[in-house]
């Protein structure tokens, strides 16, 4: 498949927004997969647009949190099966496409802001891979989440086989991948795939509440805390190494940042802190 054809077909498949956060100068970034009639498949163009949209928002210092969601009844049903008929037979384009998926997923944990998946509906295959690489997820109570590659003669290649055992444990990962079944939203919460379940019509309101909480934090402290959490998770470091890295980052932040001092002064003066991210 020619990449130009793919990009042309997906020219409006991702929407990028900045929404004001109440009582704050900051904004929430929203990235919405926008092919609802096809359950928001993650074709090559969509992957590239997701990467570009997330990069754009992550580079904007006014963005305090980034939400990723889907339009319509699905978060994402995964890869575009119709296009796979040709793409999976191309020994040049298919590896490049999967490589772009890997690069997108691996970059999300490095962004300075929290990236939160809002699982508004069905999430399978690539959709669930995207969910797992976000910092955490919230789900509508109507969501259904799973892998399902094997249901269609496929197998995971974007990270599900590597990531799922770390998220839900080896036995549950084997069950979910090999059975191909979809979890209810409550099961997904119990298994650790999402951290919270809310009524479907309250998902955006829950996101707005979370954005207000994040806007009250020092963006520099959030960046450093996320850096330590994710770098240690990805490295698989032992506890001694984890403690050493945490100490180094903490000392640098506390001793050199204006935000650390501002937080202490605001507490002692019984006022709201005015964090500047430095």
Image (cartoon, rainbow, N blue to C red):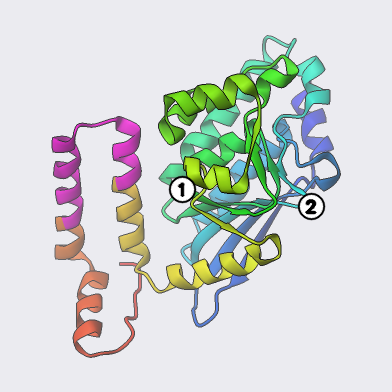
Can residue 158 be spotted in the picture?
Answer: no
The residues colored magenta run 229-250
Q: Nearer the viewer, residue 56 or 156?
A: 156
Residue furthest right as drawn: 37
Q: Secondary structure at mark 1?
A: loop
Q: Position of residue 92 (x, y in %)?
A: 67, 12
Disc 1 marks which residue?
135
Give me the residue at 47% from left, 43% from top. 192
Q: Position of residue 122 (x, y in %)?
A: 71, 42
Q: Where does the N terminus fall, quadrant-wise?
A: top right
Label whose residue precedes the other's in the sequence (1 or 2) = 2
Which residue, given by chain and number where applicable, does mark 2 sit on?
Answer: 72
Around disc 2, counting alpha carbons within 10 Å, would you say few (fewer than 14), some (14 to 19), or many (20 or more)?
Answer: some
Crowding at mark 1 (Cα within 10 Å: few <14, some 14-19, many 20+) = some
Callout 2 secondary element = loop
Q: Which mark is residue 68?
A: none
Residue 136 part of the magenta segment: no
The verdict on residue 231 being magenta is yes
Q: Is residue 262 left or right of residue 141?
A: left
Classify residue 48 as left or right of residue 166: right
Find residue 97 and report its horizontal and vertical position in percent: 65, 24
- Residue at the spot 66% in from the left edge and 29% down from the top edge: 181
Q: Quadrant of residue 165?
A: top left
Q: CA distance from mark 1 to mark 2?
A: 23 Å
Please state if 99 lies on the left or on the right of 213 as rendered.
right
Nearest the viewer among 44 and 238 is: 238
Compared with residue 85, is residue 276 higher up or lower down, i.e. above or below? Answer: below
Q: Is residue 77 visible?
A: yes
Task: Decide which of 160, 265 is in the foreground and name it.
Answer: 160
Q: Main secondary structure of the magenta part?
A: helix
Task: Please determine whether, in this image, residue 175 is positioned above or below residue 246.
Answer: above
């Amino acid at each position: 498949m020619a990449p130009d054809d793919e990009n042309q077909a997906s020219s409006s498949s991702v929407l990028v927004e900045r929404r004001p956060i109440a009582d704050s100068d900051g904004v929430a970034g929203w990235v919405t997969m926008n092919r609802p009639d096809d359950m928001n498949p993650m074709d090559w163009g969509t992957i590239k647009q997701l990467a570009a949209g997330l990069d754009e928002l992550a580079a904007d210092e006014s963005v305090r949190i980034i939400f990723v969601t889907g339009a319509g009844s699905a978060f994402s049903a995964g890869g575009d099966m119709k296009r796979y008929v040709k793409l999976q037979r191309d020994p040049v384009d298919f590896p490049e496409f999967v490589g772009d998926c890997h690069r997108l997923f691996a970059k999300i944990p490095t962004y300075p802001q929290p990236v939160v998946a809002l699982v508004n509906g069905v999430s399978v295959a690539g959709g669930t891979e995207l969910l797992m690489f976000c910092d955490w997820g919230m789900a509508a109570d109507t969501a259904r989440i799973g892998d399902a590659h094997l249901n269609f003669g496929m197998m995971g290649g974007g990270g599900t086989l590597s990531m799922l055992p770390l998220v839900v444990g080896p036995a549950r990962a084997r069950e979910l991948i090999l059975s191909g079944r979809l979890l209810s939203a409550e099961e997904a919460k119990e298994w650790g795939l999402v951290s919270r379940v809310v009524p479907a019509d309250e998902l955006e309101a829950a996101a707005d509440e979370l954005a207000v909480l994040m806007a009250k934090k020092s963006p520099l402290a959030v960046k450093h805390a996320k850096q330590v959490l994710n770098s240690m998770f990805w490295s698989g470091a032992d506890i001694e190494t984890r403690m050493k890295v945490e100490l180094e980052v903490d000392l640098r932040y506390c001793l050199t940042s204006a935000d650390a001092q501002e937080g202490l002064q605001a507490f002692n003066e019984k006022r709201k802190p005015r964090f500047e991210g430095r």
